[in-house]
Image (tube, grey):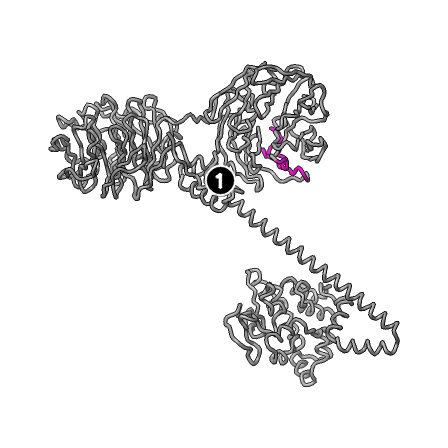
Amino acid sequence: MLKVFRAIEHSHQKGVIHRDLKPSNILIVEGDGGPVPKVIDFGVAKAIDSLGADMSVTMHDTIVGTPIYMSPEQAFRDEVDVDTRSDVYSLGVLLYELLTGYTPLDADRVRKLGIDGIRQALNESESYRPSLQLRHSRVDDRERIGSERSSTIARLEAEIRGDLDWIVMKALERDRTKRYGGASEFAADLDRYLRQLPVLASPPRAADRVSKFIKRHRTSVVASVALLAVLVGGVIVSMRQALRASLAEQEAREAQRETSFAYERALRDREEAIRSESMARLHEYVADINVGYHAVEDGHIAKALSLLERQRQSDPSGELRGFEWRYLASLCLGAPHRTLSRQAAPVHSLAFSGDGSLLAVGTRESVQVWDVEAEEPQISVAGPASAVAFLEGDEEFVVANRSGVVVHDLESGEVRRELIGQVGGGAVSLSPSHELLATSGGGGVTLWDTENWQSVRQFPNVSGPLAFSDDEQVLATGSAEGIVLWEVSKGRRTVLEDSAAPLRGLFPGGSRILFSPGGQFVVAPHVEKSELGIFYLGIWDVETGQELGFLPSSPADEGHAGMITSLAADWGAQVIASSSWDHSVRLWDLQNRRLLRSLHGHRGEVWATALSPEGSLIASGSKDGEVKVWPVTGPAEADALEGQWKPLSFSRDSRYVGALNRKGKVAIINLDTREVVHELKVDSSNERYSRFVAAMSNDLVSLAEAMPRGKVRIRDLDKGQVIREFESGSSRVDQIVMAPDGLTMVTVGWRDDLAWWDMNDLSAPITRIVGRQAIFSADGKTLATVERGGSSVIWDTGTRTERRRIEHGDQSFGSSVAISPSGTVLALTFGIDDFENAVSLWDTATGKHLGALQGHKQAIWSVAFSSDGRTLASSSADGSLRLWNVESRRELMSLEEGGAGLAHLTFSPDGSFLVAGTPPFAGSGQIRIIYAPAIGPQGPERQIIP
């Protein structure tokens, strides 16, 4: 029997409830040198309308299972959930039948009952204990039962009576909460019984026995009580009634307790389920942000955008999405740009008109000519276009593909002429004067006179890409040998050394060869990676064909990560634009051979690029049909301002930040323009200790600065005047913090002397306490102070009383502290001696340690909470700036800043900016600005600019 129990427990572990255990579903087979039981027929296989004659059928729709073996709750499956304890009941019936030869519910009786009768019998009928069942067995069954068990009824009764009775009856409890929790628990109790150890099952309490007896023999009890009342008188009757009332009251109380317990347990289970679902959802969000950030680092904008969009749709209320989501979205948007309506096919080529007002977009399905300013298509010509070009005067444009070369009227789109003999090409190039047109096809390259459209010269066995020198004396073509330079007038050729042969089909018509002004050298991409692991441009001398250098010259992270597909140039500005399979467009300073800008925002490989004639715009087209138009010189959105700055405070509208530098200069910086709009020289305090010891009000009007010998000076920044100077009571002031409402201030002296001041009365502090660091919560309701020795104190700023003391261990030099905007979470670091380099989080209400944020490799300089309290930023000497999700305590992203790292992290009130300075010991520094703009309800899609 124990093997059957183990089989059922195994099915429960696999999430399967049998619901139809009975003798016919247990087979005995030979195996392992003896009989082995096998449990079969899991689940309900068929629905029928009535009971079979032998009651060994499975009902459906109304009752699931075999009635004489099923649990009471299984009969009421529409009202009560069925769980593994239902199988425990059925196992109890099987054991009962094995011991006594009978089932608890008489089969003959059940056969005569309907569905409702079966339910009533299961819910109300009381069964004999197995030993009593044997005692009361029918005479004609006694011999059979004894012989089948190689014993006598009397001996069986004696062996079963006691623990085995109660084990069986515990499994048959109508209240499933009183049964064994599972088959393994049932089997374990049987095993204890067999090994003569104490068992879990026990006889029912007296109250339970009385209650069950009364329910079974209600009529007899009532009659006996009535007779007894007549015989012994009213007093006995009264005592009996009192006893019955007491028992009923006790049962009612127990039932009430059971109901209350079940209700509380249900509430706990529901809350736990909600928490589990919420935490799983949060972990998915954190993982998506982390993967999305790495995707952006790899240039895979499409992947990052899909993850952002998934989170936007699954979190429409923005409950989870915070600073990190907006920052990642801004990275995906890239530099400001316009996006034209998506093409239905990959973009093969782009060309601006002579005046820059029109843009021709060639795809494998059509050519569209767009008005750049209006962002509207003017005409559309069906048919593939691997290359496009505008002719002189912008009245006609040329379309080339593998079928030939066609000249179209710009106004009507009608075909003006077709160039014969150009099948199989797909590349074109106009000479600077527009007098010559080079086309590839027919096994070579043909030069055409654009005035009479007569063939001028042919160059055999070469192909695109094509390019003219500015004096039109040299034509560059592709060939199996590499890039070939032809003297147009003489037909002489020069092959550029180590130049790449064109990869047919990969770059249908994009220009991939450029001549410098004066025609002294040629720029073209290499098709293999450099030793630095990047794709790069080669620069060749036209006269000798020798390679002169590379672009970029260094370092590796400036180059393209994918093959370069197209080039465009503004020679007046010495700027070259390159597009690549790595989804980016890059602008290069040819003279200094360095990167000017990287333009990110395409979701697919960028196949074509073009610069407007005046050099102000660059167009790019990608494999997914996107066409973007970018300004060559972007707006002034520098993410750093040079200087040893310490951010002090944001304005209430988050548009300005006040900062102080080591030379005693205070500046107000406009974060929209990155310009200093107000500057004031203040007196530099003790050069050794207090250069950065100052605090600013969030209206950016008042400045409190530490002065030598423990003095504090209050200055009106608008007027540039000193309002007040007072003694702090310490020989040196190491920290000043202002409350968000500007009404109070805390100064910290070098001997842990912390003073709390009323800004309207600085004659004496409100109170003095011990502390080495202090910080106000953004809502102004909480002050946290850190004491030497390893304690922090949480203060109520309204009553100025201690709310909670947190014991966290001592901190060393370089420790930092932050408190969430609502004052509920305290973040601490433990300085340069902390070998774990972790941020420790504490619940300020309970003092409970919430966990640690680990990931930095070196000491942590600064920590700060975002304005919504969901994100924590931490910066380290390892040069990283990490963003963490506070609730899950998992890393969202790590921004590698390099150098000595960042310090003085500060979030803006609206949560759109994170600014930081550099540590005071750094030789040079800057104020770093990280922008996470608000994103519209339609997701991270930006309409473009100027």
Relative height, residue 933 to residue 592 (above, below): below
In the image, residue 744 lies at what x, y percent? 66, 25
How many circles with numbers are drawn on the protein? 1
Residue closer to the observer: 618 or 701: 701
| Residue 811 in which image quadrant | top right
In the image, residue 903 lies at what x, y percent? 55, 26
Residue closer to the observer: 920 or 931: 931
Which amino acid type corresponds to the residue marked 1 in the rendered image? Asn
- Asked if residue 423 lies left or right of residue 211, the reply is left
In the image, residue 64 lies at what x, y percent? 56, 70
Residue closer to the observer: 499 or 457: 457
| Residue 32 in which image quadrant | bottom right
Q: Residue at x 70, y 85 (%)?
A: 139
Region rendered in magenta: 822-845
User: Which residue extends farthest bottom?
Assistant: 140
Relative height, residue 700 to residue 252 (above, below): above
841 in the magenta segment: yes
Residue 503 appears anywhere in the view: no
Q: Which residue is mark 1?
A: 290
- Asked if residue 240 lies left or right of residue 472, the reply is right
Look at the numbered disc 1 and give the secondary structure of its residue.
helix
Q: Residue at x 21, y 36 (%)?
A: 411
